[in-house]
Image (cartoon, coloured by chain):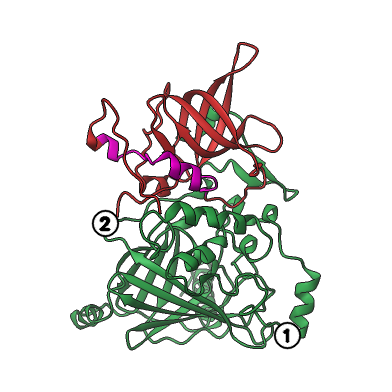
Chain colours: A red, B green
Amino acid sequence: MTRPEMTKGTNMSMNKSVRRVILLASLAAGVASLAMAHHSYAAFDVTTERVIVGSIKKFDWSNPHTWAWIDVPNEQGGVDTWGVEGMSPNYLARRGWSRTTLKPGDKITVTIRPMKDGSKGGMWVTAKRPNGEILLMGGTITDP
Amino acid sequence: MQSPRQIVLGFLTASLAFAAVASAQSAGQRVVRKAPTAADWEAIAKLPDFTGVWEAGGGGGGGGRGAAPAAAQGAAPAAGARGPAAAGAPAAGAQGAAPATAGARGGGRAGGRGRGGAGRGGPSLTPEYAAKAKATPPPTAEENLTANCLPPGLPGIMTQPYPYEFLLTPGQVTIISEAYTEVRHIYTDGRPLPEDPDPNFYGTSVGHWDGNTLVVDTVGFAQVPRGLNFPYSDKLKVTERFQLTDPDTMSIETTVTDPLALTMPYSMGTRSLRRHRNWTIAEYICEENNRNGVDENGKARINLANPEASPK
C-alpha cells in the first residue's frame, strides 16, 4: 500500500501541514476516485471526470456532506459557481481536514465526477493547490 | 360536601389514573429501575471493557493505516447497486455497502458474506416470503430513503462506516451511532423481551453476558430501511454477539431469525470494530444541509441552488 506522506509546503509549519490532508499524487490517482460516503451517487456520472479551475467561494462544513462552492471563470468572460459535494465533517476531521482547510479566495483545481444533467456541480475526487498540495477526501486517519 | 366542580375534577383525576395504569399494562413489562449501588458499578468494572469509540470503516477496522480510501471506494459500487445495500443505505458513508466493506477490511471475516442475498450464506426464504421477494424488487439506489436522512434501522445502523460509542452502566449498554446521531438502548437488567412491542426502527433490545460475550436479542421491527435484502415479518429477531478479540478490537456477529420469512437463521457475518481511544463522537445531523436527496418521484436530485443558504 502506498504510504501517504505530508507535503513540505514552503511557508507552512509542520504543525500546519499535519492538519492538512496531503497525500502522494500516486495515491490520489489510485484510490480517491470514489472515496465518497453517500447514499446516492445516482445524480453523478461516476464514469467520467472533469477538472474545474477556480477559487473557493465558500466551504460548507456541514452534514451529511461538505460542499465546496467554487467560482470558475467561464468562456463568456463571466464566473460560474460550481458546487462540489464532499465527505462529511466527521470523516474529514479525522483525516486532517478542518472547516478552514478551504478558505474563500483559495485558488484550486478540482477533479470531480460531474453531474449527469450537466449542471454545474459534482462530486469531489481530488484537488490540487497552486503549490502542488493534493487534497483528498479519503486517506489515512491522522488522528488515531 | 363536594361541589359539582370537585366531583368532576375527582372523576377526571380517577379516570386519568386508571388510563395511565391501563396504558402501562397494555404496553407490557414496565421495569422500575433502582438507583445503582456501588456494587453495581463494581460489577461493571469486571466486565470486558467495551467503553469508548469504535469504528470499522475509515481505516480503523483492522484494515490498517491507509486502508480508508480503498474501503470507501469499495463501498461505492455496492452503494449504487440494487439489493441489500440500497435497502439499508446509510447516508453516513455508503450504504449497506459499509458492512461488506468493513467485513472485507476488518479482518475479512464475514462482513460481506451473504449481503448479496445470493449464493452461499444468503437468506433462505420460506415459499411465501420468496414469492414476496419476487413480487417486490429491491429498491434501487435512487429509491433510498436514507438519502433523505431517514436513518436505517437495526441491523443497518450497525453496519455504518462511522464510529460507535459504547457506554456500560448498571442494567444497560448504550450504543451511540455517529451516523445519523442515533442511540440504541440495550437493557441488561434481566428483563425479558417484550411480548408485543411497538414496532420501530431499532426494536427493543435486551442483553445478557455469556462469559465475556454480550449477547443481545432485539425484536419489534417496523418495516423501514434496515439493510436487509429480503422481506421480513413482525417476528423478525436480530441476535448480536459482541466480544473483544483483542484489547482494542471488538467483533460483532449478527444473526437474523424470522419464523415466517426464513427457513433457517441467516448469518450476516461478523463485523470487526477497532477502538480509537482519543476519538469522540462527532455530531451528524443529516438534515442540516442535505442537498443530495431523493425527490417525490424517487429520483436522486442535487440542489445546487443558493449556496449562501447553507447553514455553515
Q: Residues within 10 Å of mark 1 (few under 14, many from 20)?
A: some
x and y percentages locating residue A135 in the rendered image? 42, 37
Across the whole image, how many numbered discs are drawn on residues? Answer: 2
- Residue B94 visible? The answer is no
Residue A72 location, quadrant: top right
**What is the spatial separation of the Cα atoms under label 1 and label 2, in whole angstroms?**
47 Å
Q: Which residue is mark 2?
A: B278
Q: Which residue is mark 1?
A: B126
x and y percentages locating residue B131 in the rendered image? 79, 78
Q: Secondary structure at mark 2?
A: loop
Query: Is residue B131 a member of the stretch shown in magenta?
Result: no
Residue A83 location, quadrant: top right
Compared to residue B97, the image places residue A135 above or below, namely above
Residue at 53% across, 31% down:
B309
Query: Is residue A27 a member of the stretch shown in magenta?
Result: yes
x and y percentages locating residue B233 in the rendered image? 67, 79
Q: Residues within 10 Å of mark 2 (few under 14, many from 20)?
A: few
- The magenta segment: A16-36
Amino acid under label 2?
Asn
Q: Secondary structure at mark 1?
A: loop
Compared to residue B286, the image places residue A98 above or below, namely above
The chain letter for the residue carrying disc 1 is: B
Residue at 69% across, 38% down:
A116
